[in-house]
Amino acid sequence: MQTHLADEFKNTPDGEQAEAILRKCVHCGFCTATCPTYQLLGDELDGPRGRIYLMKQVLEGAPVTRSTQLHLDRCLTCRNCESTCPSGVEYGHLVDIGRKIVEQRVERPRGEKTVRWLLKEGLTSPLFGPAMALGRIARPLLPATLKHKVPPAPGPRAKLWPTREHPRKVLMLLGCVQPTMMPNINSATARVLDAAGIQTLVADGAGCCGALRTHLGDVDGGLADMRRNIDAWWPLVEGLTSVGKVEAIVMNASGCGVSVKDYGHALAHDADYAERARRISALTRDLSELLPELVGPLKKKLHTIKARRLAFHPPCTLQHGQQLRGGVETHLNALGFEVSVAASESHLCCGSAGTYSVLQPELATQLRDRKLGHLAPLQPEAIVSANIGCIQHLQSGTATPVRHWVEVLDDALH
């Protein structure tokens, strides 16, 4: 695909990167066949190939319209197209560049701007916890759309954090909404790792991974979140504190994992952070990547498995963003669970995609119901996943419990 970038983009990091990505695209259309929004809407401009053409036009200086913005907004950034692409087109990086430019040039309606500001500032605010507590009190009175966003109060085990010290130590990102909405995921992670002889540490200064602001068009804000996390983690990465040095940075939310693994790329042109960002990315592991070495120690400690027959929904950020497939179900099966994935469309997004389910509720609900329809024939005792957004979104459409896989493993250990 030949490109002729406008002068303002030539010789800039974004322009050079976009041009390199566009050169790889052979316009074959394989990506269209696995794009969730194209499956629903049947519009070429709501598939990767059409969006690539729109972004190419923007980079070549064509007028940017509200229609261009709408088609980019509808993209889930699930990166299924990257798994399908035979040419290795880095669509996720390209759409980040395209959205950044379009956001600068197209004025959003006041209502949209307000909602997006509330999401990026509210979900990362210290006030989010108190607001969620009030939401739980008022939950019976809330309309269905809001009620589904307010999970029930966590049980007492959510506050149970192991206190034993181990020679092996890892650092864990708590996340921005997870400590308030589903804190048991974090404490269950710490308990499971503790049972395997690994101590979990947390850096108090760390917060949102940066994906939230970046995907809402606030690229500078997202980069600031990344730098803050690197500063918070660095003493533990270098072993500069009394607790020692960590061997890995563990993510139990695959959405955060794909973001932190990309820090090296996002900050490659920042002279002050580029090398540290590269180190942080290299150290980052999704929790499932630790499973192979956990199976042996944990198998000896398993008690009664409360929910044995499980349906696993692999998040897009795990199977496409991080290219990790098959690990969770394989190793949980080795531990005595009966884990299956949907026979059809297990590769497609459930519609959560961070804030997508709030900003594009109609499409998100259609994708959710489609996903649940494919999981239903498995007749699971519980549905498990690896990302809080997927868990919350799927739970809003089913009475079957939806949990993080580490929680069911933790249950079997106690």
Image (cartoon, rainbow, N blue to C red):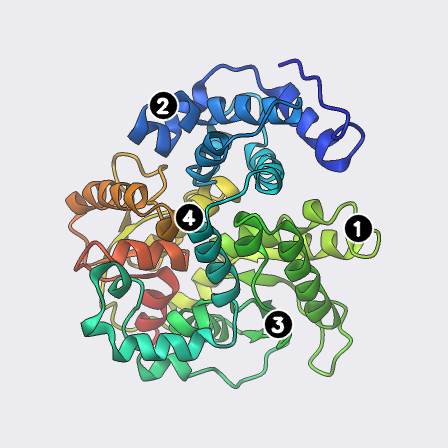
What amino acid is labelled 1 in the image? Asp
Mark 3 or 1: the one toward you: 1
Mark 4 or 3: the one toward you: 4
Can you say which quadrant of the picture contains the N terminus?
Answer: top right
Mark 2 or 4: the one toward you: 2
For the point 25% across and 67% down, which residue is it? 305
Residue 78 visible in this rendered orientation of the protein:
no
Tell me how far mark 2 sits from mark 1, CA to CA. 38 Å
Residue 317 location (% of width, % of height): 47, 46
Badge 4 local density, few (<14 within 10 Å), some, or many (20+)? many
Badge 2 local density, few (<14 within 10 Å), some, or many (20+)? few
Residue 175 location (% of width, % of height): 51, 66
Q: Which residue is mark 1?
A: 270
Counting residues from the start of the chain, the first of labels 4 and 1 encountered is 1
Where 291 sits versus 105, above or below? below
Toward the viewer: 343 or 51? 51
Badge 1 local density, few (<14 within 10 Å), some, or many (20+)? few
Q: What secondary structure is marked by label 3?
A: strand
What amino acid is labelled 3 in the image? Lys
Toward the viewer: 189 or 22? 22
Mark 2 or 1: the one toward you: 2
Q: Which residue is mark 4?
A: 353
Tell me how far mark 4 sits from mark 3, CA to CA. 31 Å
Where 222 sits versus 13, above or below? below
Q: Which residue is mark 3?
A: 169
What amino acid is labelled 2 in the image? Asp
For the point 46% across and 57% down, which residue is it? 114
**Relative to residue 280, is residue 333 drawn left or right?**
left
Mark 2 or 3: the one toward you: 2
Q: Which residue is mark 2?
A: 43
Can you say which quadrant of the picture contains the C terminus?
Answer: bottom left
